[in-house]
Amino acid sequence: MEVTSVVQLDQTKAKDECLNLSLRPLQVSDVDDFMVWASDEKVTRFCTWEPYTNKEDGLNYIKNKVVPHPWFRAICVDDRPVGAISVSANSGNDKCRGELGYVLASKYWGKGIVTRAVKMVVDTIFVEWPHLERLEALVDVENVGSQRVLEKAGFQREGVLRKYFILKGRSRDMVMFSLLSTDY
Amino acid sequence: MEVTSVVQLDQTKAKDEYPNLSLRPLQVSDVDDFMVWASDEKNYIKNIVVPHPWLRAICIDDRPVGAISVSANSGNDKCRGELGYVLASKYWGKGIVTRAVKMVVDTIFVEWPHLERLEALVDVENVGSQRELEKAGFQREGVLRKYFIVKGRSRDRVMFSFLSTDYQS
């Protein structure tokens, strides 16, 4: 797949630093940029995985998980990957919903980048996947920054699911957010 | 598996007309009783023939009138299990599901020590089922909009949960 045919440019006016933000597929050649956020324990704090310690693991992840993923994009500033955003697909009676996930290098936190990236995903995913009616996201109760991102992107907070999920050996309460194709 | 070794008797004081309520494994010989509720189109709960790691017939006088089950998850999801139940419509509105759910709660956290959360998703329009869970001590956590497809249409579901820490014998 040619990279240029699936570059999404952020058309909104950025109120803070005028960052040139785009989404495009993440490739094996991006592994060094990937390792910047994947090896950072600040970034992985609320992720199920531990920080990456070697480039070989990073390459395997991109080859085996990213490339075949139903919808995975690098979040790019000036065409350099600084994070990633993805939507998982479900099958059967669950296929009306997809789960949103994202990660961003800590150097770029607090600039509204993920909010803009989420809005770009919302702009396209319901068109690319007409069967999708619900985009949902589960956020750790303590991850207040991430909850704010979703609220600013127009997601609705539906409730706290208690002891929903095991994160690094402990069960965690998760806040459920959703955005419907009809909200959009 | 011998039936008698896994029969759970309802020890609570039955206030209504069905004192002899029990849970036991469902067997092939129960098929005629099973068909009474499985062919009943008023039921909201989907097909329970899919094998479950924990499934029991809800019995009155040892005759199956419904079924109740808990699904298991793996990996990072294994702290939670999903409760499901179905009851022949003739027996609706008598608190039978509430009693059966309480019997499950009494045993599942002991049988599955890794389980911390028992959850149930109920259609927003299924008010009767929501009431049964509230009476059984479940906490309503929120409405998950257009969560699941039932008979071709996406439906809003109410999420309920009961934690092992909620449980007091």
Image: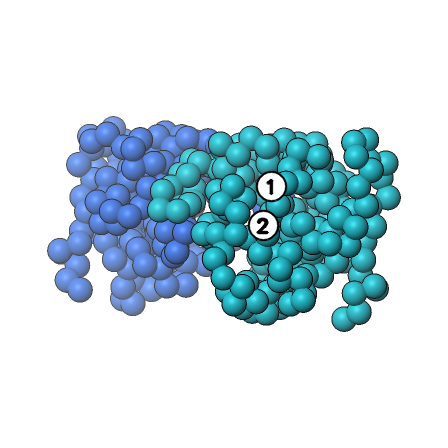
Chain colours: A cyan, B blue
Q: Residue A37 carries which label?
A: 2
Marks 1 and 2, how far apart in space?
A: 7 Å
* Mark 2 Cα shell of 10 Å, populated few (<14), some (14-19), many (≥20): many
| Amino acid type, label 1 | Ser
Residue A32 at what x, y percent from top left? 62, 60
Which residue does the image show at 52% across and 67% down from the upper left?
Answer: A56
| Amino acid type, label 2 | Trp
Which quadrant does the N terminus of chain B fall into?
bottom left
Residue B142 at what x, y percent from top left? 53, 33
The residue that disc 1 covers is A106
Residue B74 as seen in the image, left or right of residue A19: left
Residue A125 as seen in the image, left or right of residue A62: right
Q: Nearer the viewer, residue A39 or B70?
A: A39
Q: What element carries label 2?
A: helix
Q: Nearer the viewer, residue A15 or B165?
A: A15
Residue A175 at what x, y percent from top left? 52, 35
Q: In this view, does A166 lie above or below B93?
A: below
Q: Nearer the viewer, residue B156 or A149?
A: A149
Quarter residue A162 falls in: top left
Residue A56 visible in image? yes
